[in-house]
Image (spheres, helix red, strand yellow):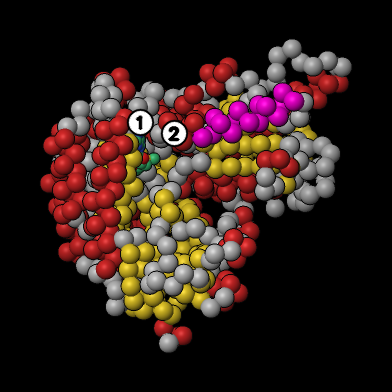
């Protein structure tokens, strides 16, 4: 087996307990010495980060690193961070602080900050937190093994010279604005593609081996005024469809029943063939087209794989995948061609996560979202016209600069009018580097943001209750993914999962009994379903299987049912 990272071929075929040799443009060198190092990796934030962490894990495991469950057992501690809201950064920084205490007490650890916070804060983060040894932005994760090795070499060298280095050994890989400097060239040289292509396909690398993420685009070109993603993840780059289909096929071969395609505006996927190739003629990732491209009818675009084409291709090529999903949909430019493919392909889930962000035109304009409330609603009703059993979820921000009581009330009205099964509701968090922080004063006081957040959650809860209640009496396929216990004794809850939506615990047992085991899963429309089981072992038989379930009761964020074959 030969893995390929940016300009580097890893040519060893057997790693553990041996010394892997890396050869690249600068000749061969040894990357690891001694017994495998123990790594702890913790992930904050979105599905994109979860996938990045899985790829990092596969890459380091192939090089002989061993992953451990707690940071206390690790020699290398890595935090894959999120910058979307300040709170997410604070969580990661508090972990960084704890590791700092350990290092100052003399523990020999390598501490790495990966992901969006590393990219956003850059070397300032190193200045403020000297305990951090390496920074690696999301566009440079393929370089992580080199960075760790650099830190180790520098440390070994200073130890060999019998002195503690005057300046701590640091390693940094950040994209800056590199990804926006040139269009096709930057994309064609995209080392990250090699990281995706070197995916380990190891079911044990995923908590739920039956479910997997595949990214179809990276980065974002939309520049909503509140959002750091276009700066931290760089320009929107679209992967070649052949790479995506092949990845789905290999995941299916490794047991994946459900694949979720990832992109910040996933429906904007569009790959024009023949325009981005490597020197040896292979298809390469290409920078996404401007928004104007979506004004053309897809049929008029020659030799292009649209998002609808891609969905159809995966559906046909990988029939063993029972569920094909995608997130996040951008409400504008969501073509009817996509809805038709969703209608015609039974294994494509009729579920849309399409954030509205606000129910006020004035706020949407300040957010630079590019649509009005009327256009958003028209999009939603178009979805239900083509797919009457679709489910809809989204994100909403409260307390955006200048949001008046009337603007907020308009958002509540939108949630009352449209059948959102759930919305993730966020308090606006001003982010350094974004347009909003420079252009608009953060003028909604925090207590007002908090009040609006709670008030909107209450409105959403009523809408969710209506949406969930409408499913009672129907029979649906459920893919089980967890087990939970409702018991007086904490011992009986061991091994159980809490059911959470957007970080919030979903209601307790549906139906009234106080002590029992439940298996929990999701419908194709991403509705959470709990099914009673007589004991733990029989509950644990279900995760990773799809069963027909008759839905019998509902709560705002949860359905209860019975497995048809048990009746
Ligand atoms: N690309 C997706 C889209 O446009 O719908 C969203 C990706 S973003 C990582 C996830 C969500 O975080 C956004 O939909 C938005 O609601 C929220 N978000 C982003 N920046 C935020 C900020 N500065 N303050 C509060 N919420 C924010
Ligand atoms: Fe952020 Fe807007 Fe891009 Fe979503 S579409 S990632 S909210 S800039």
> In the image, which disc is placed on residue 153?
none
Q: Which residue is drawn at 47% across and 75% down?
A: 532
- Mark 1 C-beta closer than 8 Å to ligand 1: yes
Q: How crowded is mark 1: few (under 14 residues within 10 Å), some or many (20 or more)?
A: many
Quadrant position of the C terminus in the picture: bottom left
What label does residue 87 carry, if any?
2
- Residue 429's tag is 1
**Circles 1 and 2 in contact, beta carbons < 8 Å:** yes
Q: Quadrant of residue 406?
A: top left
Q: Front-most of 160 and 132?
A: 132
> Which of pointers 1 and 2 lies earlier in the amino acid sequence?
2
Q: Can I make out residue 130 in this image?
A: yes
Name the residue: 25% across, 44% down: 455
Q: Is residue 326 left or right of residue 480?
A: left
Q: Does the magenta stretch include residue 101?
A: yes
Question: Is residue 366 shown above or below 65?
Answer: above
Question: Mark 2 packing: few (<14 Cα in 10 Å), some, or many (20+)?
Answer: few
Which residue reaches farthest bottom? 567
**Residue 492 is drawn in which quadrant?**
bottom right
Residue 435 in magenta stretch: no
Q: In this view, does 529 lie to the left or right of 489?
A: left
457 or 64, nearer to the observer: 457
SS category of the residue bearing label 1: loop
Specify start and end residues of the magenta stretch as a single range.
91-105
Residue at (54% x, 22% y) in the render: 125
């Amino acid at each position: 087996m030969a893995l390929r990272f940016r300009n580097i071929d890893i040519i060893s075929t057997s790693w553990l307990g041996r010394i892997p040799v890396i050869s690249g443009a600068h000749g061969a060198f040894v990357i690891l010495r001694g017994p495998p190092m123990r790594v702890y990796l913790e992930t904050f934030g979105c599905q994109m980060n979860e996938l990045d962490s899985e790829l990092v894990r596969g890459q380091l495991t192939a090089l002989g690193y061993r992953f451990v469950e707690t940071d206390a057992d690790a020699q290398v501690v890595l935090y894959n961070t999120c910058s979307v809201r300040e709170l997410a950064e604070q969580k990661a920084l508090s972990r960084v602080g704890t590791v700092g205490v350990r290092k100052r007490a003399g523990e020999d650890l390598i501490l790495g900050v990966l992901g969006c916070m590393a990219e956003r804060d850059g070397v300032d983060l190193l200045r403020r937190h000297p305990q951090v040894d390496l920074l690696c932005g999301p566009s440079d994760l393929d370089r992580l093994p080199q960075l760790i090795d650099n830190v180790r070499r520098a440390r070994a060298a200073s130890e060999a010279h019998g002195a503690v280095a005057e300046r701590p050994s640091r390693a940094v890989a950040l994209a800056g604005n590199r990804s926006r400097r040139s269009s096709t060239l930057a994309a064609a040289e995209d080392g990250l593609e090699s990281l995706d292509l070197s995916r380990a396909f190891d079911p044990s690398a995923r908590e739920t081996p039956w479910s997997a993420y595949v990214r179809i685009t990276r980065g974002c070109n939309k520049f909503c005024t509140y959002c750091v993603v276009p700066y931290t993840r760089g320009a929107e780059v679209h992967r070649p469809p052949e790479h995506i289909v092949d990845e789905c096929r290999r995941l299916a071969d490794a047991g994946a029943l459900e694949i979720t395609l990832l992109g910040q505006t996933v429906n904007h996927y569009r790959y024009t063939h023949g325009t981005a190739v490597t020197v040896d003629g292979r298809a390469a990732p290409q920078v996404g087209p401007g928004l104007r491209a979506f004004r053309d009818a897809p049929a008029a675009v020659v030799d292009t794989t649209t998002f609808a084409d891609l969905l159809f291709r995966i559906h046909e090529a990988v029939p063993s995948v029972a569920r094909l999903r995608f997130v996040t949909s951008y409400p504008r430019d969501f073509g009817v061609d996509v809805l038709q493919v969703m209608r015609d392909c039974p294994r494509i889930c009729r579920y849309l996560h399409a954030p509205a962000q606000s129910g006020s035109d004035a706020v949407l304009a300040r957010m630079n979202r590019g649509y009005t409330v009327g256009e958003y609603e028209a999009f939603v009703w178009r979805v239900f016209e083509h797919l009457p059993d679709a489910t809809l979820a989204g994100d909403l921000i409260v307390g955006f600069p200048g949001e008046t009581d009337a603007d907020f009330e308009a958002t509540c009205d939108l949630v009352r009018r449209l059948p959102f099964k759930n919305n993730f509701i966020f308090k606006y968090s001003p982010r350094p580097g974004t347009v909003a922080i420079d252009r608009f004063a953060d003028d909604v006081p925090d207590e007002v943001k908090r009040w609006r957040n709670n008030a909107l959650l209450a409105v959403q809860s009523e809408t969710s209750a209506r949406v969930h209640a409408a499913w009672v009496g129907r029979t649906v396929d459920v893919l089980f993914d967890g087990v939970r216990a409702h018991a007086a004794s904490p011992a009986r809850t061991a091994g159980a999962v809490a059911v959470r939506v957007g970080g919030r615990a979903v209601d307790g047992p549906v139906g009234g009994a106080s002590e029992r085991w439940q298996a929990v899963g999701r419908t194709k429309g991403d509705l959470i379903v709990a099914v009673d089981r007589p004991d733990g072992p029989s509950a644990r038989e279900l995760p990773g299987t799809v069963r027909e379930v008759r839905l019998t009761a509902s709560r705002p964020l949860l359905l209860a049912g019975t497995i048809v074959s048990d009746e």
